Image: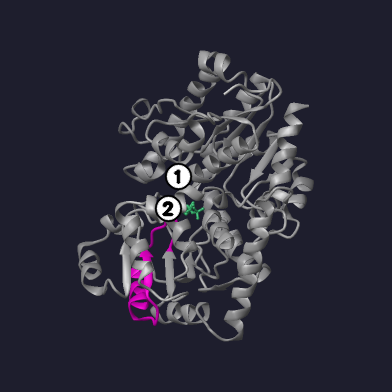
Amino acid sequence: MERAAAEPHFVLVPWQGTISHIIPMTDIGRLLACHGAAVTIITTPANAPLVQSRVEDLATPPHGAITVTAIPFPAAEAGLPDGCERLDLLRSPGDVPRFFAANKQFGEAVARYCRGSEAMLRLRRRPSCVVAGMCHSWALGLGRELGVPCYVFHGFGAFALLCIEYLYKHRPHEAGITFAATAAFRAIDDHGLWDDAGDTEFDVAVDGVVVNSFDELEHGSCALLAEATGKNVVAVGPVSLFRSPHVDPQAMTGDARRVMEWLDTKESKSVVYVSFGSAGCMPPAQVMQLGMALASCRWPVVWVVKGADSMPDDVKKWFRESFDSNKCLVVRGWAPQVAILAHRAVGGFLTHCGWGSTLEAIAAGMPVATWPLFAEQFLNERLIVDVLGVGVSVGVTKPTENVLSAGKLNGSRADIEVEVGMEQVMKTLERLMDEGDEGEQRRRKAQELKTKANRALEKGGSSYMNLEKLIQSLVS
Ligand code: UDP
């Protein structure tokens, strides 16, 4: 496709650590392309099929606006097995530093590609802007070298980023002020995750922040974040509303199709959907308390369970024997979450409050029960419950131990305490699915947010205009 000379070219490099980062950044690529920009998404070979499958309608003629490029990830050089290109593929927590070392070398390979690639120079012209996933701190040097702005995408909401900014500046957790969010923050600090990623400097120096959110959602947090950081903060979401081919149940196969057909047999707003994100994993005793509640509650349930393979044998046996598949559908693989949330049969979502899931629930007008596991998920819970009024809290007060270890440890750790008992889960579900005034009010608020979310992406809406402004700033 012939392109106007002034049209900017975005180079997007999603953080390949988790699928939950790759998904929204790919969707941001779609959005940019639909606004007329040229887009190159750079990822690793193991992750390229996922990216490709989400953009193929825009990557082939007559569009041709998106190019997906796979650059080898030097896993073996860093002492990892070949193909180990995401955190969920690591063998043990000890592999995490190796993964970050490989990521640095990956950055050098990306820079070589951007500098010298014939394809880049001949077909796509020089980049006008680099948008890097969190942990790609090397991208700043690339942007500087190319003489173009470098934006970061953290996968967090603006409210959480603002809180993190204040926590870094004022460090209340060191002064002994504690609440769940500071405890979670300290857990991240203690794990040295930011240090591994070399993030702090990167965050201070980047030119802007792209957020999967919309201005109306977070009560001025985007503007406050811009003020606090002095950066251009661009809210472009909810990006999940922009990928209709992937919510088409007809196009689904295997497990995904099975879930949708199961939902088709259920009454409207009768089902509870339970998922803790792409890798969220609990200790076995906690899984059993949750499972007993789901098996005995009054509603049909779709329960997405990650890390089931690393559970002890007795827990695996309990799983096999405890669930009537008409009452509780257990999904061990990948569930089509956006399609599930859009299904008429689903009436509530028990979530770990990952930002992707939070926004997908909001985009679907879905009330939620909140069970944060770690990190900024505790901040997202406060936004959902206290500010937006669309959720009820399960009542978790501290981060789930070892959830940072790519789900590999929790599944086998029998010694971690249970914080939420079966009764507590049952009570929360009663409130979530409540048909009285309180439940109605939450449903009404959730529907209002869904309407606002859709408006934000429509022509002239806030996210639409933010993207236009970003593109225009690069043209001029
Ligand atoms: N997801 C999905 N199916 C699954 C698990 C997760 O589609 O079985 C998607 C979900 O729709 C969301 C992302 O994975 O887009 C999870 O992101 P989130 O930020 O909520 O959580 P994380 O995985 O980062 O903890």
- The residue carrying mark 2 is 278
Identity, as a three-letter code, of the amino acid under mark 1: Thr
Q: Residue at the location (73% across, 44% down)? A: 465
Residue 71: quarter of image:
top left
Residue 162 on the magenta segment: no
- The magenta region covers 275-303
Residue 42 at x, y = what percent? 50, 30
Residue 276 on the magenta segment: yes
Q: Residue at the location (77% across, 52% down)? A: 224
Q: Residue at the location (65% across, 71% down)? A: 445
Using the image, tell me which numbered label, if any, was put on residue 275. none
In the image, is the residue at mark 1 within 8 Å of ligand 1 by its beta carbon? yes
Q: Is residue 380 left or right of residue 231?
A: left
Q: Residue at the location (44% across, 51% down)? A: 404
- The residue carrying mark 1 is 18
Packing grade of label 2 (10 A; few <14, some 14-19, many >=20) is many
Q: Nearer the viewer, residue 360 or 171?
A: 360
Identity, as a three-letter code, of the amino acid under mark 2: Ser
Residue 353 at x, y = what percent? 53, 61
Q: Is residue 268 visible?
A: yes
In the image, is the residue at mark 2 within 8 Å of ligand 1 by its beta carbon? yes
Residue 240 at x, y = what percent? 54, 51
**Quadrant the N terminus occupies:** top right
Distance from disc 1 to disc 2, alpha carbons, whole Å, reads 8 Å
Residue 228 vertical placement versus 181 (above, below): above
Question: Total of numbered circles in the picture?
Answer: 2
Q: Is residue 179 visible?
A: no
Whether label 1 touches label 2, CB < 8 Å: yes
**Quadrant the C terminus occupies:** top right
